[in-house]
Image: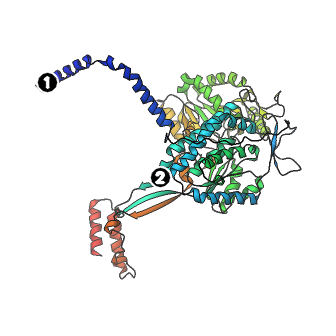
Amino acid sequence: MAVEDLVAWADELSNLIREFPFNDFVFLFYPFLCAVVGGIILYFTHTDYWDKPKRYTVPAPKKPDEFKILDNPTVKVSGTTAIQCYNPATGQFLGFVNPSTPAGIDRAIAQAAAAQEKWAQTTFSERRKVLRSMLQYVLDNQEQICQVSSMDSGKTMVDAQLGEIMVTAEKLQWTIKHGEKALRPSRRPTNLLMSYKKNTVHYEPLGVVAALVSWNYPFHNLIGPIISSIFAGNGVVVKVSEQTCWSAAYYTSIARGALVAHGHDPQLIQSVVCWPQTAGHLTSHPGISHLTFIGSRPVCHQVAASAAKSLIPVVAELGGKDAAVILDSAAPDLNRIVDILMRGTFQASGQNCIGIERIVAAPGVYDKLVSMLEPRVKALRLGLDKDVGAMVSDASFTRLEGLVSDAVAKGARLLAGGKRYVHPDHPQGFYFAPTLLVDVTPDMAIANEECFGPIMTILRAPSSSASDILSLANAPDFGLGASVYGRDSDPTLKAVVRGIRAGGVAVNDFAVYYAVQLPFGGVGGSGYGRFAGEEGLRGLCNLKSVCEDRFAWLGVRTAIPPPVRYPVKDQGRGWRFTKGVVGLGYAITIREKLGALVDVLRNM
Protein backbone atom coordinates (compact mmCIF):
# COMPACT_ATOMS: atom_id res chain seq x y z
CA MET A 1 0.00 0.00 0.00
CA ALA A 2 2.84 2.34 0.90
CA VAL A 3 4.48 1.75 -2.50
CA GLU A 4 1.24 2.51 -4.32
CA ASP A 5 0.85 5.75 -2.34
CA LEU A 6 4.42 6.74 -3.18
CA VAL A 7 3.86 6.11 -6.89
CA ALA A 8 0.63 8.12 -6.81
CA TRP A 9 2.41 10.97 -5.05
CA ALA A 10 5.22 10.96 -7.64
CA ASP A 11 2.70 11.04 -10.50
CA GLU A 12 0.86 13.94 -8.94
CA LEU A 13 4.14 15.85 -8.44
CA SER A 14 5.10 15.26 -12.08
CA ASN A 15 1.72 16.63 -13.21
CA LEU A 16 2.14 19.72 -11.07
CA ILE A 17 5.63 20.34 -12.53
CA ARG A 18 4.34 19.94 -16.09
CA GLU A 19 1.47 22.32 -15.41
CA PHE A 20 3.60 24.96 -13.66
CA PRO A 21 3.69 28.20 -15.76
CA PHE A 22 7.47 28.46 -16.13
CA ASN A 23 7.08 30.80 -19.09
CA ASP A 24 5.58 33.39 -16.78
CA PHE A 25 8.86 33.52 -14.85
CA VAL A 26 11.38 33.38 -17.71
CA PHE A 27 11.93 37.14 -17.42
CA LEU A 28 13.47 36.52 -13.97
CA PHE A 29 16.07 34.05 -15.24
CA TYR A 30 18.57 36.51 -16.70
CA PRO A 31 18.46 38.99 -13.80
CA PHE A 32 18.93 36.07 -11.42
CA LEU A 33 21.85 34.74 -13.45
CA CYS A 34 23.45 38.18 -13.61
CA ALA A 35 23.03 38.62 -9.86
CA VAL A 36 24.73 35.28 -9.18
CA VAL A 37 27.61 35.93 -11.58
CA GLY A 38 27.99 39.49 -10.33
CA GLY A 39 28.05 38.29 -6.75
CA ILE A 40 30.78 35.79 -7.55
CA ILE A 41 32.86 38.43 -9.35
CA LEU A 42 32.32 40.87 -6.48
CA TYR A 43 33.40 38.28 -3.93
CA PHE A 44 36.62 37.40 -5.74
CA THR A 45 37.62 40.96 -6.62
CA HIS A 46 36.58 43.08 -3.66
CA THR A 47 36.89 43.16 0.06
CA ASP A 48 34.96 45.79 2.02
CA TYR A 49 33.45 47.02 -1.23
CA TRP A 50 32.07 50.23 0.22
CA ASP A 51 35.46 51.21 1.62
CA LYS A 52 36.71 53.01 -1.47
CA PRO A 53 40.46 53.43 -2.12
CA LYS A 54 41.95 56.90 -2.04
CA ARG A 55 43.58 58.03 -5.25
CA TYR A 56 46.89 59.86 -5.01
CA THR A 57 49.64 61.02 -7.32
CA VAL A 58 53.38 60.39 -7.38
CA PRO A 59 55.90 62.28 -9.52
CA ALA A 60 57.43 60.17 -12.28
CA PRO A 61 61.18 59.67 -12.22
CA LYS A 62 63.08 62.54 -13.79
CA LYS A 63 64.71 61.80 -17.11
CA PRO A 64 67.87 63.64 -18.14
CA ASP A 65 67.36 66.83 -20.13
CA GLU A 66 69.73 65.64 -22.83
CA PHE A 67 69.29 62.34 -24.69
CA LYS A 68 72.62 60.59 -24.57
CA ILE A 69 73.79 57.11 -25.55
CA LEU A 70 76.72 55.90 -23.47
CA ASP A 71 79.75 54.49 -25.25
CA ASN A 72 80.30 51.96 -22.49
CA PRO A 73 77.18 51.53 -20.34
CA THR A 74 78.22 50.47 -16.83
CA VAL A 75 77.08 51.29 -13.32
CA LYS A 76 80.55 52.20 -12.08
CA VAL A 77 82.47 55.03 -13.69
CA SER A 78 85.74 56.68 -12.74
CA GLY A 79 85.78 60.03 -11.02
CA THR A 80 82.63 59.57 -8.93
CA THR A 81 81.18 57.27 -6.29
CA ALA A 82 77.70 57.77 -7.73
CA ILE A 83 75.96 54.92 -9.52
CA GLN A 84 75.45 55.48 -13.24
CA CYS A 85 72.02 54.42 -14.48
CA TYR A 86 71.25 53.51 -18.06
CA ASN A 87 68.72 51.70 -20.25
CA PRO A 88 70.29 48.29 -20.96
CA ALA A 89 68.22 47.92 -24.14
CA THR A 90 69.60 51.05 -25.76
CA GLY A 91 72.53 52.31 -23.70
CA GLN A 92 70.65 55.56 -22.98
CA PHE A 93 71.99 57.49 -19.98
CA LEU A 94 69.30 57.90 -17.29
CA GLY A 95 71.16 59.68 -14.52
CA PHE A 96 73.29 59.23 -11.42
CA VAL A 97 72.13 57.95 -8.03
CA ASN A 98 74.15 58.60 -4.89
CA PRO A 99 74.73 55.40 -2.93
CA SER A 100 73.83 55.14 0.73
CA THR A 101 76.58 55.33 3.33
CA PRO A 102 76.61 53.46 6.66
CA ALA A 103 75.35 56.65 8.31
CA GLY A 104 72.55 56.89 5.75
CA ILE A 105 71.54 53.28 6.43
CA ASP A 106 71.50 54.06 10.17
CA ARG A 107 69.16 56.99 9.55
CA ALA A 108 66.85 54.93 7.35
CA ILE A 109 66.55 52.21 9.98
CA ALA A 110 65.99 54.76 12.77
CA GLN A 111 63.26 56.55 10.79
CA ALA A 112 61.51 53.26 9.98
CA ALA A 113 61.73 52.21 13.64
CA ALA A 114 60.19 55.47 14.87
CA ALA A 115 57.31 55.19 12.42
CA GLN A 116 56.82 51.50 13.19
CA GLU A 117 56.06 52.11 16.86
CA LYS A 118 52.83 53.85 15.91
CA TRP A 119 52.11 51.66 12.87
CA ALA A 120 52.24 48.51 15.03
CA GLN A 121 49.12 49.77 16.82
CA THR A 122 47.04 50.03 13.64
CA THR A 123 44.23 47.59 12.93
CA PHE A 124 44.11 45.18 10.04
CA SER A 125 41.31 47.30 8.61
CA GLU A 126 43.57 50.36 8.55
CA ARG A 127 46.36 48.39 6.89
CA ARG A 128 43.96 47.03 4.27
CA LYS A 129 42.93 50.57 3.38
CA VAL A 130 46.55 51.45 2.64
CA LEU A 131 47.03 48.38 0.46
CA ARG A 132 43.75 48.94 -1.34
CA SER A 133 44.79 52.47 -2.29
CA MET A 134 48.18 51.15 -3.38
CA LEU A 135 46.45 48.58 -5.59
CA GLN A 136 44.31 51.31 -7.12
CA TYR A 137 47.41 53.34 -7.93
CA VAL A 138 49.08 50.34 -9.58
CA LEU A 139 46.00 49.68 -11.71
CA ASP A 140 45.62 53.34 -12.67
CA ASN A 141 49.29 53.81 -13.53
CA GLN A 142 50.37 50.43 -14.84
CA GLU A 143 51.57 51.80 -18.18
CA GLN A 144 53.93 54.27 -16.55
CA ILE A 145 55.17 51.64 -14.07
CA CYS A 146 55.90 49.28 -16.97
CA GLN A 147 57.65 52.00 -18.98
CA VAL A 148 59.92 52.81 -16.05
CA SER A 149 60.71 49.13 -15.51
CA SER A 150 61.41 48.71 -19.21
CA MET A 151 63.83 51.63 -19.22
CA ASP A 152 65.63 50.50 -16.07
CA SER A 153 65.86 46.76 -16.76
CA GLY A 154 65.55 46.41 -20.54
CA LYS A 155 62.45 44.20 -20.59
CA THR A 156 59.56 44.54 -23.04
CA MET A 157 56.28 46.10 -21.98
CA VAL A 158 54.53 42.73 -22.17
CA ASP A 159 57.14 41.15 -19.90
CA ALA A 160 56.79 44.08 -17.50
CA GLN A 161 53.00 43.74 -17.48
CA LEU A 162 53.22 40.05 -16.56
CA GLY A 163 56.22 40.19 -14.22
CA GLU A 164 55.71 43.56 -12.57
CA ILE A 165 52.01 44.45 -12.59
CA MET A 166 50.06 41.19 -12.55
CA VAL A 167 52.00 39.51 -9.75
CA THR A 168 52.06 42.70 -7.67
CA ALA A 169 48.31 43.19 -8.08
CA GLU A 170 47.78 39.58 -7.03
CA LYS A 171 49.97 39.97 -3.95
CA LEU A 172 48.10 43.12 -2.96
CA GLN A 173 44.69 41.56 -3.53
CA TRP A 174 45.59 38.35 -1.72
CA THR A 175 46.91 40.25 1.28
CA ILE A 176 43.84 42.48 1.37
CA LYS A 177 41.49 39.48 1.26
CA HIS A 178 43.39 36.86 3.25
CA GLY A 179 46.13 38.60 5.23
CA GLU A 180 44.09 39.13 8.38
CA LYS A 181 43.04 35.49 8.46
CA ALA A 182 46.69 34.45 8.32
CA LEU A 183 47.71 36.76 11.17
CA ARG A 184 44.73 36.47 13.52
CA PRO A 185 45.57 34.72 16.79
CA SER A 186 45.16 30.99 16.17
CA ARG A 187 43.85 28.54 18.73
CA ARG A 188 45.92 25.42 19.39
CA PRO A 189 44.91 22.11 21.01
CA THR A 190 45.69 21.12 24.58
CA ASN A 191 46.09 17.73 26.34
CA LEU A 192 44.56 15.81 29.22
CA LEU A 193 46.92 17.11 31.89
CA MET A 194 46.51 20.67 30.65
CA SER A 195 42.82 20.45 29.81
CA TYR A 196 42.14 23.44 32.05
CA LYS A 197 44.37 25.60 29.80
CA LYS A 198 43.60 27.33 26.51
CA ASN A 199 46.40 27.89 24.01
CA THR A 200 46.82 30.63 21.41
CA VAL A 201 49.56 31.69 19.02
CA HIS A 202 49.77 35.43 18.40
CA TYR A 203 51.51 36.91 15.36
CA GLU A 204 53.15 40.15 16.44
CA PRO A 205 55.30 42.62 14.49
CA LEU A 206 59.05 42.10 14.64
CA GLY A 207 59.99 45.78 14.34
CA VAL A 208 62.02 46.79 11.30
CA VAL A 209 62.74 44.12 8.70
CA ALA A 210 64.91 44.32 5.59
CA ALA A 211 64.94 42.87 2.11
CA LEU A 212 67.84 42.69 -0.33
CA VAL A 213 66.29 42.18 -3.74
CA SER A 214 67.51 41.40 -7.23
CA TRP A 215 67.33 43.53 -10.36
CA ASN A 216 65.28 41.35 -12.72
CA TYR A 217 61.88 42.78 -11.69
CA PRO A 218 62.65 46.17 -10.12
CA PHE A 219 59.04 47.10 -9.28
CA HIS A 220 57.71 43.79 -8.01
CA ASN A 221 60.86 42.83 -6.13
CA LEU A 222 60.76 46.12 -4.22
CA ILE A 223 57.01 46.36 -3.61
CA GLY A 224 56.50 42.67 -2.74
CA PRO A 225 58.45 42.75 0.56
CA ILE A 226 56.88 46.10 1.42
CA ILE A 227 53.35 44.69 1.10
CA SER A 228 53.98 41.77 3.44
CA SER A 229 56.14 43.69 5.89
CA ILE A 230 53.78 46.58 6.55
CA PHE A 231 50.69 44.38 6.68
CA ALA A 232 52.41 42.37 9.41
CA GLY A 233 52.91 45.64 11.31
CA ASN A 234 56.60 46.14 10.57
CA GLY A 235 58.72 48.93 9.21
CA VAL A 236 60.84 47.91 6.22
CA VAL A 237 64.12 48.80 4.55
CA VAL A 238 64.58 47.47 1.01
CA LYS A 239 68.05 47.44 -0.51
CA VAL A 240 67.67 47.56 -4.27
CA SER A 241 70.30 46.51 -6.78
CA GLU A 242 72.64 49.12 -8.13
CA GLN A 243 71.75 47.73 -11.60
CA THR A 244 68.19 49.08 -11.40
CA CYS A 245 68.30 51.83 -8.79
CA TRP A 246 67.08 54.60 -11.12
CA SER A 247 63.46 53.45 -10.65
CA ALA A 248 63.70 52.77 -6.93
CA ALA A 249 62.82 56.26 -5.68
CA TYR A 250 59.70 56.36 -7.85
CA TYR A 251 58.57 52.88 -6.85
CA THR A 252 59.21 53.64 -3.17
CA SER A 253 57.11 56.79 -3.51
CA ILE A 254 54.21 54.68 -4.78
CA ALA A 255 54.19 52.69 -1.55
CA ARG A 256 54.76 55.74 0.62
CA GLY A 257 52.03 57.64 -1.18
CA ALA A 258 49.45 55.12 0.01
CA LEU A 259 50.55 55.68 3.60
CA VAL A 260 50.34 59.46 3.24
CA ALA A 261 46.88 59.21 1.65
CA HIS A 262 45.61 57.61 4.85
CA GLY A 263 47.48 59.83 7.29
CA HIS A 264 50.34 57.52 8.20
CA ASP A 265 54.05 58.24 8.43
CA PRO A 266 55.75 57.51 5.06
CA GLN A 267 59.08 56.95 6.84
CA LEU A 268 57.78 53.48 7.69
CA ILE A 269 59.06 52.45 4.24
CA GLN A 270 62.68 53.00 3.29
CA SER A 271 64.73 52.04 0.27
CA VAL A 272 68.49 52.23 -0.01
CA VAL A 273 71.08 51.43 -2.64
CA CYS A 274 74.75 50.95 -1.91
CA TRP A 275 77.91 49.41 -3.24
CA PRO A 276 78.58 45.82 -2.11
CA GLN A 277 81.19 46.84 0.45
CA THR A 278 78.57 48.85 2.35
CA ALA A 279 75.80 46.23 2.28
CA GLY A 280 77.24 44.40 5.28
CA HIS A 281 76.33 47.37 7.46
CA LEU A 282 72.66 46.68 6.72
CA THR A 283 72.80 42.88 6.90
CA SER A 284 74.45 42.88 10.34
CA HIS A 285 72.61 45.88 11.77
CA PRO A 286 71.19 45.23 15.27
CA GLY A 287 68.15 47.32 14.37
CA ILE A 288 67.05 44.76 11.77
CA SER A 289 64.87 41.87 12.96
CA HIS A 290 64.59 39.80 9.78
CA LEU A 291 66.24 39.61 6.35
CA THR A 292 64.85 38.45 3.02
CA PHE A 293 67.53 37.91 0.41
CA ILE A 294 66.92 37.35 -3.30
CA GLY A 295 70.10 36.80 -5.26
CA SER A 296 72.95 34.43 -5.96
CA ARG A 297 74.40 31.67 -3.82
CA PRO A 298 77.90 33.21 -3.44
CA VAL A 299 76.45 36.52 -2.24
CA CYS A 300 74.07 34.69 0.10
CA HIS A 301 77.03 33.12 1.90
CA GLN A 302 78.26 36.62 2.70
CA VAL A 303 74.80 37.86 3.68
CA ALA A 304 74.15 34.90 5.99
CA ALA A 305 77.57 35.25 7.65
CA SER A 306 76.98 38.96 8.16
CA ALA A 307 73.47 38.43 9.56
CA ALA A 308 74.79 35.83 11.96
CA LYS A 309 76.77 38.55 13.76
CA SER A 310 73.50 39.97 15.08
CA LEU A 311 71.60 36.65 14.97
CA ILE A 312 69.24 38.01 12.30
CA PRO A 313 67.08 35.26 10.74
CA VAL A 314 67.34 35.05 6.95
CA VAL A 315 65.03 33.81 4.22
CA ALA A 316 67.07 33.14 1.07
CA GLU A 317 65.81 32.68 -2.48
CA LEU A 318 68.79 31.86 -4.69
CA GLY A 319 67.38 31.05 -8.10
CA GLY A 320 67.13 27.64 -9.67
CA LYS A 321 67.66 25.28 -12.55
CA ASP A 322 63.96 24.64 -13.01
CA ALA A 323 62.97 21.64 -15.07
CA ALA A 324 59.93 21.39 -17.33
CA VAL A 325 59.17 17.67 -17.60
CA ILE A 326 57.27 16.57 -20.71
CA LEU A 327 55.83 13.06 -20.42
CA ASP A 328 54.79 10.79 -23.29
CA SER A 329 51.15 11.26 -22.31
CA ALA A 330 51.50 14.98 -23.09
CA ALA A 331 51.75 14.27 -26.84
CA PRO A 332 48.17 15.36 -27.72
CA ASP A 333 48.75 18.69 -25.91
CA LEU A 334 52.13 19.67 -27.39
CA ASN A 335 50.86 22.74 -29.26
CA ARG A 336 49.73 24.36 -26.00
CA ILE A 337 52.79 23.15 -24.11
CA VAL A 338 55.20 24.61 -26.68
CA ASP A 339 53.61 28.05 -26.18
CA ILE A 340 54.15 27.73 -22.44
CA LEU A 341 57.75 26.56 -22.84
CA MET A 342 58.54 29.57 -25.01
CA ARG A 343 57.06 32.04 -22.52
CA GLY A 344 58.59 30.24 -19.53
CA THR A 345 62.08 30.27 -21.06
CA PHE A 346 62.35 33.62 -22.81
CA GLN A 347 60.26 35.97 -20.65
CA ALA A 348 62.43 38.84 -19.38
CA SER A 349 65.17 37.48 -21.66
CA GLY A 350 65.44 34.43 -19.41
CA GLN A 351 66.23 36.53 -16.32
CA ASN A 352 63.52 34.92 -14.27
CA CYS A 353 64.07 33.15 -10.93
CA ILE A 354 61.50 30.50 -11.78
CA GLY A 355 62.11 30.54 -15.51
CA ILE A 356 62.38 27.23 -17.35
CA GLU A 357 66.08 26.40 -17.46
CA ARG A 358 65.81 22.79 -18.66
CA ILE A 359 63.27 20.79 -20.64
CA VAL A 360 63.36 17.10 -19.78
CA ALA A 361 61.44 15.22 -22.48
CA ALA A 362 60.41 11.57 -22.46
CA PRO A 363 61.62 9.58 -25.51
CA GLY A 364 58.14 9.39 -27.05
CA VAL A 365 57.81 13.17 -27.43
CA TYR A 366 61.43 14.31 -27.67
CA ASP A 367 61.87 14.47 -31.46
CA LYS A 368 58.45 16.02 -32.05
CA LEU A 369 59.10 18.62 -29.38
CA VAL A 370 62.47 19.60 -30.88
CA SER A 371 60.96 19.92 -34.37
CA MET A 372 58.20 22.17 -33.02
CA LEU A 373 60.47 24.38 -30.94
CA GLU A 374 63.27 24.94 -33.46
CA PRO A 375 61.36 27.23 -35.85
CA ARG A 376 59.70 29.04 -32.94
CA VAL A 377 63.03 29.92 -31.30
CA LYS A 378 64.65 30.89 -34.60
CA ALA A 379 61.76 33.26 -35.31
CA LEU A 380 62.18 35.26 -32.10
CA ARG A 381 63.05 38.92 -32.63
CA LEU A 382 65.14 41.07 -30.30
CA GLY A 383 64.16 44.55 -29.17
CA LEU A 384 61.82 46.36 -26.80
CA ASP A 385 59.14 46.52 -29.49
CA LYS A 386 59.68 42.91 -30.59
CA ASP A 387 59.63 39.58 -28.71
CA VAL A 388 62.64 39.42 -26.38
CA GLY A 389 64.17 42.37 -24.58
CA ALA A 390 67.69 43.04 -23.40
CA MET A 391 69.65 41.60 -20.53
CA VAL A 392 70.46 43.95 -17.67
CA SER A 393 74.18 43.97 -18.54
CA ASP A 394 76.78 42.04 -20.51
CA ALA A 395 78.42 40.68 -17.36
CA SER A 396 77.28 37.10 -18.03
CA PHE A 397 77.77 37.00 -21.81
CA THR A 398 81.21 35.38 -21.77
CA ARG A 399 80.01 32.79 -19.25
CA LEU A 400 76.91 31.96 -21.29
CA GLU A 401 78.88 31.63 -24.53
CA GLY A 402 81.32 29.36 -22.70
CA LEU A 403 78.53 27.13 -21.40
CA VAL A 404 77.09 26.78 -24.91
CA SER A 405 80.49 26.07 -26.48
CA ASP A 406 81.29 23.48 -23.82
CA ALA A 407 77.98 21.69 -24.42
CA VAL A 408 78.50 21.64 -28.20
CA ALA A 409 82.02 20.27 -27.74
CA LYS A 410 80.53 17.44 -25.66
CA GLY A 411 77.90 16.48 -28.23
CA ALA A 412 74.98 18.89 -27.86
CA ARG A 413 73.45 20.38 -31.02
CA LEU A 414 73.10 24.14 -31.27
CA LEU A 415 70.02 24.89 -33.36
CA ALA A 416 69.72 28.63 -32.71
CA GLY A 417 71.62 31.51 -31.13
CA GLY A 418 74.37 30.77 -28.66
CA LYS A 419 76.13 34.13 -28.61
CA ARG A 420 75.73 37.83 -27.90
CA TYR A 421 73.84 39.89 -30.42
CA VAL A 422 74.67 43.38 -31.68
CA HIS A 423 71.36 45.08 -32.29
CA PRO A 424 71.45 47.12 -35.53
CA ASP A 425 69.39 49.95 -34.01
CA HIS A 426 70.83 49.77 -30.50
CA PRO A 427 74.47 48.64 -30.69
CA GLN A 428 75.10 49.75 -27.11
CA GLY A 429 72.26 47.57 -25.82
CA PHE A 430 72.90 44.23 -24.11
CA TYR A 431 71.27 41.49 -26.16
CA PHE A 432 71.90 37.76 -26.22
CA ALA A 433 70.49 35.76 -29.11
CA PRO A 434 67.62 33.41 -28.15
CA THR A 435 69.28 30.01 -27.97
CA LEU A 436 68.11 26.45 -28.53
CA LEU A 437 70.46 23.69 -27.43
CA VAL A 438 69.31 20.07 -27.77
CA ASP A 439 70.75 16.63 -26.95
CA VAL A 440 72.06 18.10 -23.71
CA THR A 441 73.27 15.51 -21.19
CA PRO A 442 73.44 15.79 -17.39
CA ASP A 443 77.26 15.78 -17.36
CA MET A 444 77.40 19.12 -19.21
CA ALA A 445 77.92 22.27 -17.20
CA ILE A 446 74.96 23.97 -18.85
CA ALA A 447 72.67 21.27 -17.47
CA ASN A 448 73.73 22.09 -13.91
CA GLU A 449 74.49 25.82 -13.75
CA GLU A 450 71.80 28.47 -13.73
CA CYS A 451 72.00 30.38 -17.03
CA PHE A 452 69.66 33.26 -16.17
CA GLY A 453 69.52 34.12 -19.85
CA PRO A 454 67.52 33.37 -23.03
CA ILE A 455 68.77 29.81 -23.39
CA MET A 456 66.49 26.82 -23.94
CA THR A 457 68.11 23.43 -23.27
CA ILE A 458 66.45 20.08 -23.95
CA LEU A 459 67.47 16.76 -22.40
CA ARG A 460 66.21 13.37 -23.56
CA ALA A 461 65.21 11.07 -20.68
CA PRO A 462 66.71 7.55 -20.92
CA SER A 463 63.22 6.07 -20.70
CA SER A 464 59.65 7.08 -19.96
CA SER A 465 59.80 5.76 -16.39
CA ALA A 466 59.37 8.12 -13.48
CA SER A 467 62.70 7.04 -11.98
CA ASP A 468 64.69 7.86 -15.14
CA ILE A 469 62.92 11.18 -15.58
CA LEU A 470 63.48 12.13 -11.95
CA SER A 471 67.17 11.22 -12.18
CA LEU A 472 67.53 14.04 -14.71
CA ALA A 473 65.11 16.49 -13.12
CA ASN A 474 66.74 16.21 -9.69
CA ALA A 475 70.36 16.12 -10.87
CA PRO A 476 71.41 19.78 -10.29
CA ASP A 477 71.90 21.13 -6.78
CA PHE A 478 68.92 23.44 -7.15
CA GLY A 479 65.29 23.06 -6.17
CA LEU A 480 63.25 26.20 -6.64
CA GLY A 481 60.46 25.38 -9.09
CA ALA A 482 59.42 22.79 -11.65
CA SER A 483 56.60 21.97 -14.04
CA VAL A 484 55.28 18.62 -15.21
CA TYR A 485 53.15 18.05 -18.32
CA GLY A 486 51.10 14.97 -19.08
CA ARG A 487 47.66 13.41 -18.92
CA ASP A 488 46.07 14.04 -15.53
CA SER A 489 45.33 10.33 -15.08
CA ASP A 490 48.88 9.29 -16.01
CA PRO A 491 50.44 7.53 -12.98
CA THR A 492 53.86 8.69 -14.15
CA LEU A 493 52.73 12.30 -13.80
CA LYS A 494 51.71 11.74 -10.21
CA ALA A 495 54.98 9.94 -9.45
CA VAL A 496 57.08 12.74 -10.94
CA VAL A 497 55.14 15.47 -9.09
CA ARG A 498 55.73 13.58 -5.83
CA GLY A 499 59.37 12.85 -6.52
CA ILE A 500 60.64 16.09 -7.97
CA ARG A 501 62.84 18.08 -5.60
CA ALA A 502 61.52 21.62 -5.65
CA GLY A 503 59.77 24.24 -3.57
CA GLY A 504 56.90 24.51 -6.05
CA VAL A 505 55.50 22.38 -8.86
CA ALA A 506 53.06 23.49 -11.57
CA VAL A 507 51.11 20.65 -13.17
CA ASN A 508 50.41 21.20 -16.87
CA ASP A 509 51.30 24.85 -16.42
CA PHE A 510 54.23 27.13 -15.63
CA ALA A 511 55.02 28.85 -12.30
CA VAL A 512 51.36 29.38 -11.39
CA TYR A 513 52.05 28.60 -7.73
CA TYR A 514 53.55 32.11 -7.51
CA ALA A 515 50.54 33.68 -9.21
CA VAL A 516 48.20 32.41 -6.47
CA GLN A 517 50.39 33.39 -3.51
CA LEU A 518 51.41 29.96 -2.34
CA PRO A 519 54.51 29.95 -0.11
CA PHE A 520 57.51 30.57 -2.33
CA GLY A 521 61.06 29.34 -1.86
CA GLY A 522 63.38 26.47 -2.62
CA VAL A 523 65.46 23.64 -1.25
CA GLY A 524 69.12 22.73 -1.59
CA GLY A 525 71.11 25.30 -3.54
CA SER A 526 67.97 27.34 -4.17
CA GLY A 527 67.88 28.58 -0.60
CA TYR A 528 65.72 28.16 2.48
CA GLY A 529 62.64 29.64 4.09
CA ARG A 530 59.54 30.92 2.35
CA PHE A 531 57.95 34.23 1.46
CA ALA A 532 54.45 34.84 0.06
CA GLY A 533 51.24 33.23 1.29
CA GLU A 534 50.34 32.62 4.91
CA GLU A 535 53.77 31.19 5.70
CA GLY A 536 55.50 34.25 4.31
CA LEU A 537 53.37 36.67 6.31
CA ARG A 538 53.82 34.71 9.51
CA GLY A 539 57.55 34.53 8.92
CA LEU A 540 57.67 38.30 9.34
CA CYS A 541 56.15 38.05 12.82
CA ASN A 542 57.15 37.11 16.32
CA LEU A 543 55.17 33.95 17.02
CA LYS A 544 54.14 34.43 20.63
CA SER A 545 52.69 31.36 22.34
CA VAL A 546 50.18 32.26 25.05
CA CYS A 547 48.82 29.68 27.50
CA GLU A 548 45.98 30.83 29.78
CA ASP A 549 43.60 29.35 32.34
CA ARG A 550 40.38 28.19 30.73
CA PHE A 551 38.35 28.23 33.94
CA ALA A 552 40.01 31.04 35.89
CA TRP A 553 36.58 32.36 36.81
CA LEU A 554 36.06 29.13 38.77
CA GLY A 555 39.43 29.43 40.46
CA VAL A 556 40.88 26.49 38.51
CA ARG A 557 44.61 27.16 38.28
CA THR A 558 47.88 25.29 38.50
CA ALA A 559 48.90 24.42 42.05
CA ILE A 560 52.06 22.55 43.04
CA PRO A 561 50.97 19.32 44.82
CA PRO A 562 52.56 18.46 48.23
CA PRO A 563 54.76 15.53 47.01
CA VAL A 564 56.78 17.85 44.72
CA ARG A 565 56.51 21.09 46.69
CA TYR A 566 59.84 22.54 47.84
CA PRO A 567 61.36 21.46 50.11
CA VAL A 568 60.67 17.91 48.83
CA LYS A 569 60.18 15.77 51.91
CA ASP A 570 60.49 12.33 50.25
CA GLN A 571 62.17 11.93 46.82
CA GLY A 572 60.89 8.35 46.46
CA ARG A 573 57.31 9.33 47.12
CA GLY A 574 57.67 12.41 44.88
CA TRP A 575 59.08 10.28 42.03
CA ARG A 576 56.23 7.75 42.28
CA PHE A 577 53.72 10.60 42.28
CA THR A 578 55.20 12.24 39.15
CA LYS A 579 55.46 8.85 37.47
CA GLY A 580 51.75 8.45 38.08
CA VAL A 581 51.08 11.90 36.61
CA VAL A 582 53.00 10.97 33.46
CA GLY A 583 51.09 7.70 33.18
CA LEU A 584 47.78 9.45 33.68
CA GLY A 585 48.56 11.85 30.88
CA TYR A 586 50.30 9.61 28.39
CA ALA A 587 49.68 5.92 29.06
CA ILE A 588 48.26 4.23 26.00
CA THR A 589 45.52 2.01 27.47
CA ILE A 590 42.67 2.85 29.84
CA ARG A 591 43.89 0.17 32.22
CA GLU A 592 47.34 1.76 32.39
CA LYS A 593 45.82 5.19 32.96
CA LEU A 594 43.72 3.86 35.84
CA GLY A 595 46.84 2.28 37.35
CA ALA A 596 48.64 5.61 37.05
CA LEU A 597 45.73 7.35 38.79
CA VAL A 598 46.07 4.90 41.69
CA ASP A 599 49.81 5.77 41.93
CA VAL A 600 48.95 9.46 42.07
CA LEU A 601 46.36 8.97 44.83
CA ARG A 602 48.62 6.66 46.89
CA ASN A 603 51.47 9.16 46.90
CA MET A 604 49.58 12.41 47.46
The quadrant the C terminus occupies is bottom left
The quadrant the N terminus occupies is top left
Q: Residue 133, position in %: x, y?
A: 59, 43
Lateral position of residue 554 relative to residue 316, left or right: left
**Amino acid type of the residue tagged 1 in the rendering:** Asp
Q: Residue 163, position in %: x, y?
A: 64, 36
Residue appearing at x 84%, y 52% in the figure = 81
Which residue is label 2 attached to? 184
Lateral position of residue 2 relative to residue 164, left or right: left
**Which one is in front, 408 or 338?**
338
**Which one is in front, 114 or 248?**
114
Q: Residue 12, position in %: x, y?
A: 19, 20
Judging from the image, what secondary structure is the residue with disc 1 in? helix
Is residue 457 among what the camera can see?
no
Is residue 540 among what the camera can see?
yes
Q: Is residue 434 placed above or below 481 in the rendered structure?
A: above
Mark 1 or mark 2: name the one nearer the start of the chain. Answer: 1
Residue appearing at x 62%, y 22% in the figure = 368
Label disc, if present, on residue 551 of the rendered structure? none
Q: Residues within 10 Å of mark 1 (few under 14, many from 20)?
A: few
Q: Quadrant of residue 480?
A: top right
Q: Residue 319, position in %: x, y?
A: 65, 43
Q: Residues within 10 Å of mark 2 (few under 14, many from 20)?
A: few
- Give the CA separation, mark 1 to mark 2: 56 Å
Tell me if label 1 and label 2 are in contact, CB under 8 Å: no
Q: How is the image coloured?
A: rainbow
Judging from the image, what secondary structure is the residue with disc 2 in? loop
Q: Is residue 598 placed above or below 402 in the rendered structure?
A: below
Which residue is label 1 attached to? 5
